[in-house]
């Protein structure tokens, strides 16, 4: 008997194994979520603000304000500030998404005090110097021009602008004029309103124990927490589904992007959406990936996802392919979308996806820096701590009929806008 | 400090075990000592194509991916000029599934014409997406072609020419598998929530009967003679901005000078406070992007310096700016002991953060084993710490000589 012909039993994963972060209130009222300590000699301290691009009054403002917060204050230049971080081997990395802004201080444990003190001193009152702003504009303009050479940029942009409208909070694609319009007073207003240290929630992970907590409390606890309410968000007005074709002279492939707006949903529905998306294009074994790539060889990559929108989520499908394959790929994609309602996964396909999803859900909590993003998602969507445990239950309890009903409600091909950009067929 | 143990199976498979009690998963990382440099010049891109074929199923596994997903795991792989690396992560209770899957495709891969046809199509699309549809997508084709005439480092992993992949036939790939994919040419790292005892037992069970079948790559390859004289080319690209790229050949990973050059590149153009960036992007904006970096390879390394020009600036001016600052730096006019302390602290932090990831640790252990001695993984930081300002500048002066640069000018594509 060939022992290799028998697969070892693969056990099902039905529980999560992780210790949730400890919620601590610092002396000044700030909330800090501390992940379990790991002996790594390094720490990540994440500052979180609940306001992102969806609330900005002009494109690019939120990202520019966060990117330039360490670009100079009344005492020191951008170079001096940056040199201070690098000298300790530390970094402060900004990021802005639709509904949040973050700044992550990465440092060796032994330099936590020096680098945090430096961050709090130098990043508290930026003046957004004209010189730094002009460099930022120059670099951003050039980067934008390069992105505009790729079919993917145009397929996603034209598709989302069609779904939400050009001026919506969900589609703030910045043009050269928007970049040029950035000004120090506007950046300062935004910063003071939504990005002050006094208004941040904190997430600590890595080698973070009592001694480090005491350092953070001493340095941040002296500020009084001031809750910055997220600015009023303008919902995108969803337009009629359309088909858009955008030719590009030098392109060698065509980029496909399909999208639609999903409304705000209950926790239960969000979990269903997430699971149904998996079958569509959310993992390697998904129908899109298996059919278009692994069976037909039409594309290097195609997938689908749910991204946060100001009033719910955007459901999208994207991929790049040879021009001669595009029509076949679009047709196959539509069939797969329809097929999820007509022939929802049953038996082996459903079981395999459950096993994969549950394993990945657990693996997502592995590693010393995994918890902050999980808890950020909860905060952003106002979800309870039990969300992940109930999602595990949902993975194992969802039925084929529920998948079919959800796909029938939300995944009809004619409800998605399709954009093709590049070398058109 | 990464703790590990090492043993070798009679068939030559080198195994490294690394226990992580905090993890809930097990990682199997398999490094095959075969990369693009082991390809024939008329069949480039094969190592990478083969990476795709490794997911097509094996003698006892109809679908590799289905079996991984069934165990709640995930997997991926990458290829470079020197080796091909596969990694699979599974929940700890399903560790044996990973042993079964990884060993079976080392035992007998199922390569057939249907799988080859599909993956040829996938890789051709990948080639177009990465190389033809993105600004500077052909950069490494051009730079490697300029640097080398004989060395197999002269083509990038994706392949020199798309036709090599389009023309790949079953007999070629079968021969490639037999030659390179066997235990004596591989290193396995088992990491995570699994004991050494269980690792040994599972390795014995699943790998011990796989016979070595091909060559054990020696890491020796045809080298070009030392670079002499400036090499130059200009070409058109999708980028709307013209650009200047300069590149030099450099020492191998384990050479102390390699660490020195990495630090030098970081100081020269590795951040927004480097002289290349502050002088030519900020103070006198000749470029809208400019940087330098050093690529450390087991074989030769590469020192890269580049700038993307602003409107109204020309290539000659750009090259002069880059060379002027490079010359200032090499001759000691830019950096002090404080710079050295800073760049070493950055390197130490980067290493510590890198090692926080279980997959990174597993890959690092395999990499150092492949270099010849896994124990060297403990000296990685020391290699940086030992670099002095003097020997950093000496290494830079000995490697980055103005008269042996390979220089590439990019022009925006003209409308046809």
Image: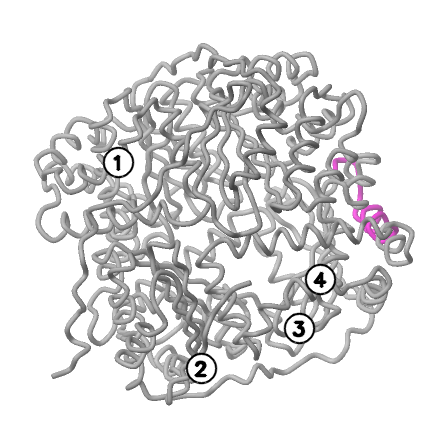
Q: First in sequence: mark 3 or mark 4?
A: 3
Q: Tell which tag, 3 or 1, sits nearer the viewer.
A: 3
* Residue at mark 3: B254
Magenta stretch contains residue A53: no
Q: Considering the numbered disc 3 on the image, is that residue within a helix, a strand or a loop?
A: loop
Q: Which range is magenta? A: B310-324
Q: First in sequence: mark 3 or mark 2?
A: 2
Instruction: Give the crowd class for mark 1: few <14, some 14-19, many >=20 residues within 10 Å.
Output: some
Chain ID at mark 3: B
Determine contact: label 3, label 4, CB under 8 Å. Answer: no
Q: Quadrant of residue B378?
A: bottom right
On whether disc 3 and disc 4 are found on a single subunit, the reply is yes
Chain ID at mark 4: B
Quote the CA–CA distance across marks 3 and 1.
46 Å
* Residue at mark 4: B384
Q: First in sequence: mark 4 or mark 2?
A: 2
Magenta stretch contains residue B313: yes
Label disc, if present, on residue B185 of the rendered structure: 2
- Identify the residue at horizontal 11%, vertical 84% (top origin): A1
Q: Tell which tag, 3 or 2, sits nearer the viewer.
A: 3
* Residue at mark 1: A274
């Amino acid at each position: 008997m060939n022992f290799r012909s028998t697969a070892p039993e693969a056990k099902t994963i039905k529980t999560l194994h992780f210790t949730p972060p400890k919620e601590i209130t610092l002396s000044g009222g700030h909330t800090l979520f501390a992940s379990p300590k790991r002996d790594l000699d390094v720490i990540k301290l994440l500052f979180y603000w609940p306001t992102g691009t969806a609330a900005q009054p002009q494109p690019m403002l939120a990202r520019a304000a966060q990117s330039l917060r360490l670009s100079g204050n009344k005492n020191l230049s951008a170079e001096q500030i940056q040199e201070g971080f690098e000298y300790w081997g530390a970094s402060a990395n900004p990021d802005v998404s639709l509904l949040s802004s973050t700044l992550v201080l990465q440092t060796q444990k032994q330099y936590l005090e020096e680098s945090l003190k430096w961050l709090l001193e130098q990043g508290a009152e930026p003046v957004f110097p004209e010189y730094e702003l002009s460099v930022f504009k120059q670099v951003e303009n050039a980067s934008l021009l390069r992105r505009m050479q790729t079919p993917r940029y145009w397929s996603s942009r034209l598709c989302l602008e069609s779904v939400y409208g050009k001026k919506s909070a969900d589609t703030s694609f910045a043009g050269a004029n928007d970049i040029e319009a950035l000004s120090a007073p506007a950046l300062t207003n935004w910063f003071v309103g939504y990005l002050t240290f006094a208004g941040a929630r904190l997430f600590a992970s890595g080698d973070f124990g009592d001694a480090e907590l005491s350092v953070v409390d001493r340095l941040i606890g002296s500020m009084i927490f001031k809750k910055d309410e997220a600015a009023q968000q303008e919902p995108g007005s969803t337009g009629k589904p359309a088909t858009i074709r955008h030719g590009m002279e030098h392109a060698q492939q065509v980029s496909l992007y399909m999208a639609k707006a999903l409304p705000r949903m209950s926790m239960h529905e969000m979990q269903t959406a997430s699971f149904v998306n998996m079958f569509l294009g959310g993992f390697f074994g998904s129908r899109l990936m298996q059919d278009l790539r692994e069976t037909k060889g039409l594309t290097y990559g195609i997938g689908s996802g749910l991204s946060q929108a100001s009033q719910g989520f955007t459901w999208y499908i994207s991929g790049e392919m040879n021009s001669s394959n595009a029509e076949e790929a679009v047709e196959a994609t539509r069939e797969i979308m329809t097929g999820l309602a007509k022939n929802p996964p049953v038996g082996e396909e459903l079981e395999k996806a459950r096993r994969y999803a549950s394993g990945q859900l657990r693996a997502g909590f592995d590693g010393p820096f995994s918890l902050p993003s999980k808890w950020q998602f909860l905060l952003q969507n106002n979800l309870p701590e039990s969300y992940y445990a109930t999602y595990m239950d949902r993975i194992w309890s969802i039925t084929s009929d529920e998948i079919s009903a959800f796909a029938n409600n939300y995944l009809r091909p004619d409800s998605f806008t399709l954009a093709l950009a590049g070398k058109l067929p | 400090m990464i703790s590990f143990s090492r043993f070798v199976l009679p068939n030559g498979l080198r195994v490294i075990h690394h226990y992580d009690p905090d993890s809930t998963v097990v990682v199997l990382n398999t490094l095959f000592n075969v990369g693009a440099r082991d390809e024939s010049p008329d069949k480039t891109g094969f190592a990478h194509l083969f990476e795709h074929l490794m997911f097509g199923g094996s003698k006892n596994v109809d679908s590799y991916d289905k079996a991984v997903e069934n165990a709640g795991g995930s997997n991926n792989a990458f290829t470079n000029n020197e080796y091909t690396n596969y990694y699979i992560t599974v929940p700890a209770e399903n560790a044996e599934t990973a042993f079964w899957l990884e060993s079976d495709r080392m035992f007998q891969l199922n390569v057939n014409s249907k799988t080859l046809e599909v993956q040829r199509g996938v890789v051709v699309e990948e080639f177009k997406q990465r190389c033809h549809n993105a600004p500077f997508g052909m950069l490494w084709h051009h730079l490697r072609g300029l640097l080398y005439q004989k060395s197999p480092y002269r083509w990038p992993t994706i392949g020199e020419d798309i036709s090599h992949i389009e023309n790949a036939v079953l007999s070629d790939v079968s021969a490639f598998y037999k030659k390179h994919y066997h235990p004596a040419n591989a290193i396995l790292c088992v990491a995570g929530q699994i004991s050494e005892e269980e690792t040994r037992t599972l390795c014995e069970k699943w790998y011990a009967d796989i016979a070595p079948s091909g060559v054990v790559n020696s890491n020796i390859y045809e080298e070009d003679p030392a670079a002499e004289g400036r090499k130059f080319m200009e070409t058109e690209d999708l980028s709307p901005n013209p650009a200047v790229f300069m590149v030099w050949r450099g020492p191998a990973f384990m050479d102390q000078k390699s660490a020195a050059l990495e630090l030098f590149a970081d100081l020269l153009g590795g951040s927004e406070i480097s002289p290349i960036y502050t002088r030519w992007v900020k103070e006198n904006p000749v470029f809208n992007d400019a940087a330098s970096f050093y690529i450390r390879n087991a074989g030769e390394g590469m020192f890269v310096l580049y700038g993307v020009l602003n409107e109204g600036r020309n290539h000659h001016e750009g090259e002069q700016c880059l060379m002027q600052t490079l010359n200032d730096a090499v001759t000691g006019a830019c950096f002090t002991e404080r710079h050295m302390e800073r760049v070493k602290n950055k390197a130490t932090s980067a290493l510590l953060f890198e090692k926080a990831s279980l997959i990174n640790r597993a890959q690092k252990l395999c990499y150092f084993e492949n270099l010849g001695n896994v124990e060297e993984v403990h000296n990685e930081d020391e290699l940086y710490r030992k670099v002095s300002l003097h020997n950093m500048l000496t290494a830079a002066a000995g490697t980055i000589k103005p008269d042996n640069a390979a220089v590439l000018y990019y022009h925006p594509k003209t409308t046809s």
